[in-house]
Image (cartoon, rainbow, N blue to C red):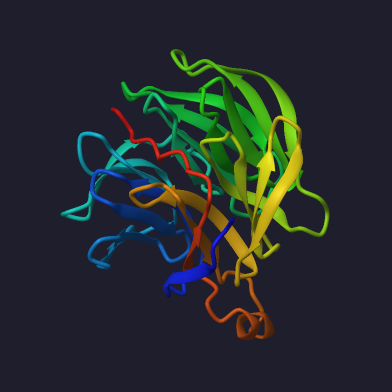
Amino acid sequence: MIGDVEHVIDAKAVLGEGPSWDKKYGELYWVDIEGKMIHIFSLESGERRTIEAGQRIGAIVPRESGGAVAALENGLYFVDLELGSFDLIINPEGDNPDIRFNDGKCDPMGRLWVGTMSMSGKEGQGSLYCLETDGILTKKLDGLGISNGLAWSPDHSFMYFIDTPTRNVVRFEYDLETGSIRNPEIAVTIPEGDGFPDGMTIDSEGHLWIAHWGGGKVSRWNPATGNLVTEVEIPALNVTSCAFGGEDLLDLYVTTARDGMSEEELKKYPNAGGVFKVRTATKGLPSFQYMG
C-alpha cells in the first residue's frame, strides 16, 4: 500500500534533481541544476540550507570522511558543506564547453558514477564516468544522449542505467570489487506517451522506481520481467528523480522541475519544482557515500 503524496519542500526549483539521503545526519541533499544551488534538508529540525554552486550542478553525494562530492558543470569537486567551498578534483571534458555533468550516484563500494550530456542537445555526446575511491577517473560508456538514472541490485550483481532519450533502462552485469560492467541488456522500456525516464532508485525487493520527465509520475518496475508493478502520480509535470530516506527508508523523496513549462502548465501544477514525499510499503536501499 502506498500512502498519500505529500508536498514537503516548496522550493520552486527551476530544475530540481539528484536527491541523496545522508543517513549519518538524517539529511536529504538535492540540487537545482539551473538554479545553481545545493539544497540540504534536515528531517528532524525541518531546517533548510542552501549553498550557491556558481554554475550548473548535476549531482551531490555525501562523502564518508565529511562533506560531499558534487558534479558541477565544469568538473567534479569536493564540497565543504560548512564553508560552502569547492575544491576541484578533475574536469575530463574541459576542452568542450558544450558538455556538462548531469546525474550521478555512488555504488556500494563508494565509487562515484556520474554522466555528462550536451547542453545544446547534440546527440551522442554524453559519457558515463566512474571516480574511483583513489581519485582515478575512468570512462565507462560513451556515445550517450543524456546520462541519467543509476541503481545497483540488492545483491550487487547488476547495475541499472538510463540514457534518457532511449526510453530504456539497461542492466549490466556488475563486478563489485572491480567496478567493471558488461553484457548490457534492456531491462525496462518506458512506453510512448509516458514521458521520458529520468532519475531512479531501487528498493530492497530489487524493484526500480523511475521518475518520468513530462509524465507526472514515478513508476515501479520489476527489472527481472520488465513489467510495471505500480505507479504514483506526482502533482508536477516534470518529475526528475527519487531517493529513499527517513529512519526506516520507507519514504520516497521525489524531486521535480519548473523548467520549460508554459504559464498554463504552471497554473495546473503550482507546486512544480518542489520536493514530494511518498510513504511506501517497501523498504528502500540507502544512498551510498563516496569513500575516497
Residue 142: percent from the left, percent from the top?
63, 30
Q: Residue furthest right?
A: 192
- Please tell me which residue is depicted at 38% across the width and 47% down the height of the picture: 248
Q: Is residue 94 visible?
A: no
Q: Is residue 133 left or right of residue 138?
A: left
Q: Residue furthest front?
A: 1
Q: Nearer the viewer, residue 165 or 125?
A: 165
Q: Residue at x 48, y 43 (%)?
A: 284
Numbered disc total: 0
In the rendered image, residue 222, in percent from the top left (x then y), is placed at 69, 38
Residue 99 place in picture, x, y as percent: 55, 45
User: The C terminus lies in which quarter of the figure?
Assistant: top left
In the image, 199: left or right of 13? right
Q: Residue at x 35, y 55 (%)?
A: 28
Please name the residue shown 43% across and 66% down the image. 35
Indicate the position of residue 31 as horizontal and vertical percent values: 41, 57
In the image: residue 187, left or right of residue 34: right
**253 over 166 or under it: above or below:** below
**168 vs 73, nearest the viewer:** 168
Residue 121 appears in the figure? yes
Work out which quarter of the rendered image holds the N terminus and state it.
bottom right
110 lies above or below 75? above
